[in-house]
Image (cartoon, grey):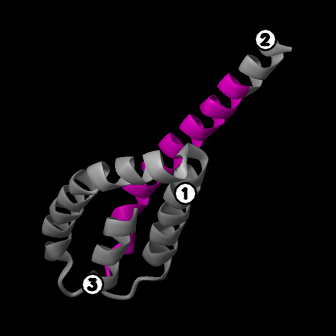
Amino acid sequence: MAVRKRFIDFRAIGVVNFLEYFSSGLLSSVSPYIYSGFELHSLTGPASVIASLISALAKFPSAKLMDLWGRPQAFGVGVGFLTLGLVFMATCKNVKTYFAAEVFY
């Protein structure tokens, strides 16, 4: 039974990994289309840098929350933020909304 459970676990890890790389590749190829209609599209570069800084600073508090809540719950919150960021990107009309989407994603 342990071998079957391990196989299922590795399969789930593979599916999550595939979906993460798929969404990342899709987003990188669609991003120019997302912000091509913005007047201030030159601000998307600094927005990406600031979003990367915010995500780097959020790693320590999120690790503490993982210890307090548990890993499955923290994973669910992370998937929720990722989904929220993608929805923001799909519906953004200006650079401010795109910046918020970058932070959530």
Q: Could you say where residue 64 lies in the image, as x and y percent from the top left?
A: 36, 50
Of discs 2 and 1, which sits in the foreground?
A: 2
Secondary structure under the numbered disc 3 in the rendered image: helix
Mark earlier in primary sequence (3, 2): 2
Q: Residue 86 appears at what percent x and percent y?
A: 49, 67
Q: How crowded is mark 1: few (under 14 residues within 10 Å), some or many (20 or more)?
A: few
Q: What secondary structure is the magenta-colored segment mainly?
A: helix
23 or 6, which lies in front? 6
Disc 1 element: helix
- Look at mark 2 in the image and give the residue it sits on: 3
Which residue corresponds to mark 1? 79
- Name the N-terminal-most of marks 3 and 1: 1
Q: Residues within 10 Å of mark 3 (few under 14, many from 20)?
A: some
The residue at the point 42 percent across, 61 percent down is: 30
Q: Which amino acid does label 2 sit on?
A: Val
Residue 83, given in percent of the width and then of the height, sits at 54, 65
Q: Which of 38 and 48 is in front in this view?
A: 48
